[in-house]
Amino acid sequence: MTNTRLPKVKSTLKPSIHPYLNGAWKPVLEEYTATDLEVIGEIPEDIDGVYVRNTENPVHQAIGNYHPFDGDGMLHSVSFKDGKVEYRNRFVRTEGFEAEQEAGGALWRGIANGIKPDSKKGWGAQGYIKDSSSTDVVIHAGKIMSTFWQCGEGYLFDPYTLEQLGTQDWVPEEGISAHPKVDVKTGELLFFNYSTTAPYQHYGVVDKNNKLVHYTPVPLPGPRLPHDMAFTKNYSILVDLPLFWDPEKIAEKKYHPHYHPDMPTRFAILPRFGTEKDVQWFEAKSTYVLHWMNAYEEGDEIVLDGYFQDQPNPPSLKWLPKRPGKVMAALDLKSLQTRLHRWRFNLKTGEVKEHHLDEEILEFGTFNQQYAGQKNRYYYSVWNKPRWFLFSGIVKQDLETGKSWRYDFGKKRYGSEAPFVPRINAKDEDDGYLVTFITDMKKNRSECVLLDAKNIEAGPVCQIILPHRICSGTHACWANGEDIRAFRE
């Protein structure tokens, strides 16, 4: 049982007051393998699997303004089995990461800057943004896959060792966006991508053995900025959102997102293996949605839940210059006014009904993935007291009764997206745990915390003290050990 720190990577970062480079969001440069960890409480023996989180964790000083979506990817994982636990973290060594390590500094301008035509070419919808693979993470067909919001490669890792295993060989020329979805019932992975050239969007299905079995255009009217997708048992849902690049500026390599409140939010619903000919379009209130929750079929209707932004175009933040194109730099839940919302799409009549499910400002929710694509009862969302993506606690919502329960992480303690972890031989939907990383700024440390999903108000079942204080982060996932090991035998 040892804790090993790997050599630090080359870095040119300077001290900064930028809220996504400071405090709980201060990047870390250390990579650890830790099997000897302090535990407060007792690790349950009725969970088996891997929790992994992706993080924007920049290594080099930004060229121009830093946007939090620009940071290099870093995975943090905790594996559980038989009441034992191990922790690891590794940078996602993308092609861009390695090029900048060799150069000894940043080579790409970030999204909060005008992209110059002579910028070093990378992935991204516009071709001049570095694919940092820092946005999202899933586990499919026995491997971790990290992805990037602007579309790029899918970088692969061993779930237990975090050994980097190259990239997906099935990724189309247009790349893959962040937020592909794993249907744990079928083992399929559903994905989409988008670009600045017609047809502007595609959708695909990868089978349980990691083979691309379906790929089709789902055309959009022009370049767009979708961020997430959803699915039911039989259908997939993609979106045309009224916040996107200024088309007139794209030819000049200028990528300024603008919100168009006079345009509707459009939803494309198609059968899982459908083509563009099968797409049924629906129009709803204008908004932007970063993240969807669950979706399911109910009679002639598709029901979809997600986090509706009441203010998709918040005022410019004081710490950034007042220039065009700063919409996506206003990254905090209070500015965006994100609320859990429900849409109902009638496949026969074309009618759309929608309403807020709750008036509290919430985002980055999770639910029991065994219920993905079918009607579920419980959601687990985060809220934040300060600004920025600094999560202060978790709310469990009962969609049947309207009741809710809360767990506050504590003063100056900030958590991450908290996936649901089913107990071995779970009996019902909330029979399990929530797992999250918490960074404690008062104690200058980070923890992996387990909460009993049936009673989150009781506080942690256990706290696993990590060997270093990690950078704050957002998207995470859980995969059962039995499912992972099925691809290792």
Image (tube, rainbow, N blue to C red):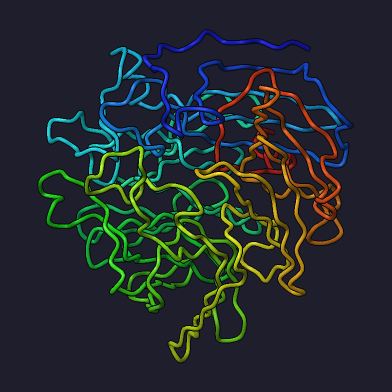
Q: Position of residue 236 (x, y in %)?
A: 48, 67
Q: On the rendered structure, is 86 left or right of 62?
A: right
Q: Residue furthest top?
A: 7
Q: Residue furthest front?
A: 318
Quadrant (top left, top right, bottom left, bottom right) of the C terminus: top right
Q: Residue furthest bottom?
A: 349
Name the residue rendered at 45%, 88% in the picture: 351
Q: On the rendered structure, is 426 left or right of 325?
A: right
Name the residue rendered at 64%, 62% in the picture: 372
How many numbered discs, if any?
A: 0
Q: Position of residue 357 (x, y in %)?
A: 61, 72
Quadrant (top left, top right, bottom left, bottom right) of the N terminus: top right
Name the residue rendered at 62%, 45% in the picture: 417
Q: On the rendered structure, is 62 left or right of 78?
A: left
Name the residue rendered at 28%, 66% in the picture: 260
Q: Nearer the viewer, residue 110 or 385?
A: 385
Q: On the rendered structure, is 144 left or right of 215?
A: right
Q: Position of residue 281 (x, y in %)?
A: 37, 77
Q: Nearer the viewer, residue 172 or 332?
A: 332
Relative vertical location of residue 447 with respect to residue 152 in this rendering, above or below: above
In terms of image quadrants, where is residue 30? top right
Q: Nearer the viewer, residue 368 or 202?
A: 368
In terms of image quadrants, where is residue 245? bottom left
In terms of image quadrants, where is residue 445? top right
Q: Nearer the viewer, residue 411 or 262?
A: 411
